[in-house]
């Protein structure tokens, strides 16, 4: 039996259940560890830099690894040699065991719960992968490699961090003593090719009429908030909406970790900054929103409002920065109104509730609410207009909704998108801006 076969066999117990960890004394793992150690020593002795390696330098490093494998295990098979070479290279230059998951286009999220448990989301469903790390130190090495490339840090004094990968994927890590299962990572992958409106229609996330209506609203400079729960696809939808912004406008994007993907020419991307080791130097989303107003923006796009920056965003929408876009966590358009009130109060401004509600209704034109369904699919379940005020209550009206009919034999949601028949009050504003509005959008 080959080393590779023995390694695969060792991952399962006699009863067929997956083993919790791979023994460090396994022959394959021992060989991998020795080659890895000797490779680092060789690189250090030859004073070879591992930073920004590509092209001929990459080939040279692979040759060094290959020769080390040959010297330590000359009888190893070609398949095992290729796998060993790839794994060691990923550990040294990439993200180790995560590389295979990151390259799998069917996987949308990766969740590392300590060294021996890695879950993935595939087609909206969670499943346990067969990927494991050697130990906690191995996981920490990968975390440090990621955060160091974007100027962030993580240690016992600052045990949580948000960052991004080179491809724009969202990254979060929590380490001991906060995480009791060992270093934990969550990676929200983004498609190498940004999703388009056609993709969302194909996925069943919304209907062609809804897409046409939303494109008209973006081009007509309506202020839009995309709401939804965690993992409902808010940022993906925000990317698609942003693609309708004309190319001749100046766009300022503001995020904790830059992940909005825009193809327009005139885009300035701003990213918040955590405090340094001395606890100073922090730049918050709110600071960036205020500063963006001095940068002559045509559009302001905030990745997500979650605290006091909501008041600055609302004021920007109310003071001539029409066409602004953002996302926020909420379970419904109605709940979003309450959450915005709470976020404004978090800014420390002692405003009457009615004044806050007047700010909200005068600033926001449309709420696009997205939900993750029980079968893992994401759907836009409400496109809702913010109409005005009745007494002290903000009035809303649905323009489009998703009607659930049940579940089919395969466990998939059955339903349909429909117009409520209500024409938005801002259609005259769209028409006066030269935006084509079709009557059949609002007819079933």
Image (cartoon, rainbow, N blue to C red):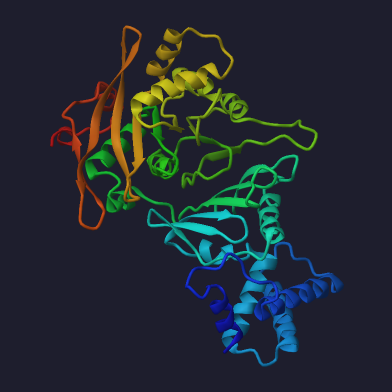
> Which residue sits at x=74%, y=80%?
64
120 or 257: nearer the viewer: 120
Return the x and y of residue 38 as percentages of the image width and height.
79, 76
Return the x and y of residue 424 as percentages of the image width and height.
24, 24
> Which residue sits at x=62%, y=75%?
86
Residue 128's place in the image compared with 71, above or below, is above
Q: How many marks?
A: 0
Residue 270's place in the image compared with 183, above or below, is above
Q: Quadrant of the N terminus?
A: bottom right
Please tell me in which quadrant of the rendered image residue 7 appears: bottom right
Residue lying farthest left? 444
179 or 260: nearer the viewer: 179
Residue 166 shown left or right of residue 261 in the figure: right
> Which residue sits at x=75%, y=77%?
34
Residue 296's place in the image compared with 9, above or below, is above
Residue lying farthest right? 45
333 or 201: nearer the viewer: 333
Return the x and y of residue 250 as percentages of the image width and height.
50, 35
Please tell me in which quadrant of the rendered image residue 123 appears: bottom left
Q: Quadrant of the C terminus?
A: top left
> Which residue sits at x=61%, y=55%?
114
Residue lying farthest front? 15
Q: Is residue 344 visible?
A: yes
33 or 187: nearer the viewer: 33
Q: Is residue 219 visible?
A: no
Residue 53's place in the image compared with 143, above or below, is below
Return the x and y of residue 8 as percentages of the image width and height.
54, 77
Residue 322 shown left or right of residue 51 in the figure: left
């Amino acid at each position: 039996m080959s080393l590779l076969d023995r390694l695969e066999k060792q991952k399962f117990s006699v009863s067929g259940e997956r083993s919790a960890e791979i023994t460090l004394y396994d022959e394959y793992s021992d060989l991998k560890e020795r080659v890895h150690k000797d490779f680092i020593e060789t690189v250090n002795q030859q004073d070879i830099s591992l930073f920004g390696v590509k092209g001929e330098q990459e080939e040279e490093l692979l040759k060094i690894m290959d020769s080390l494998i040959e010297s330590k295990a000359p009888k190893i098979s070609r398949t095992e040699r290729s796998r060993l070479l790839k794994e060691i290279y990923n550990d040294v230059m990439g993200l180790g065991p995560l590389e295979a998951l990151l390259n799998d286009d069917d996987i949308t999220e990766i969740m590392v719960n300590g060294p021996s448990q890695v879950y993935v989301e595939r087609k909206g469903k969670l499943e346990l992968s067969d990927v494991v790390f050697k130990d906690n130190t191995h996981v920490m090495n990968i975390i440090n490699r990621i955060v160091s490339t974007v100027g962030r840090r993580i240690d016992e004094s600052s045990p949580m961090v948000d960052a991004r990968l080179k491809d724009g994927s969202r990254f979060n890590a929590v380490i001991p003593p906060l995480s009791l299962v060992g270093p934990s990572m969550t990676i929200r992958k983004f498609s190498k090719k940004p999703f388009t409106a056609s993709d969302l229609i194909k996925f069943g996330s919304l209907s062609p009429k809804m897409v046409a209506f939303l494109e008209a609203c973006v081009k007509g400079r309506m202020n839009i908030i995309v709401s939804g729960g965690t993992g409902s696809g808010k940022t993906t939808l925000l990317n698609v909406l942003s693609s309708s912004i004309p190319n001749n406008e100046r766009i300022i994007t503001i995020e904790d970790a830059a992940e909005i993907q825009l193809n327009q020419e005139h885009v300035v991307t701003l990213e918040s900054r955590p405090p340094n080791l001395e606890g100073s130097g922090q730049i918050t989303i709110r600071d960036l929103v205020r500063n963006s107003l001095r940068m002559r923006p045509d559009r302001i796009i905030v990745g997500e409002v979650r605290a006091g920056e909501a008041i600055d965003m609302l004021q920007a929408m109310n003071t001539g920065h029409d066409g602004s876009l953002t996302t926020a966590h909420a379970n419904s358009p109605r709940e979003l109104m309450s959450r915005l009130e709470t976020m404004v109060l978090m800014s420390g401004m002692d405003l009457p509730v009615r004044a806050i509600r007047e700010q909200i209704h005068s600033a926001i034109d449309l709420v696009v609410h997205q939900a993750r369904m029980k079968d893992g699919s994401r759907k836009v379940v409400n496109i809702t207009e913010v109409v005005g005020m009745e007494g002290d209550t903000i009035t809303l009206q649905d323009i489009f909704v998703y009607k659930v009919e049940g579940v089919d034999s395969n466990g998939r949601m059955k339903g349909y998108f429909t117009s409520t028949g209500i024409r938005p009050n801002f259609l005259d504003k769209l028409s006066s801006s030269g935006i084509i509005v079709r009557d059949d959008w609002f007819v079933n």
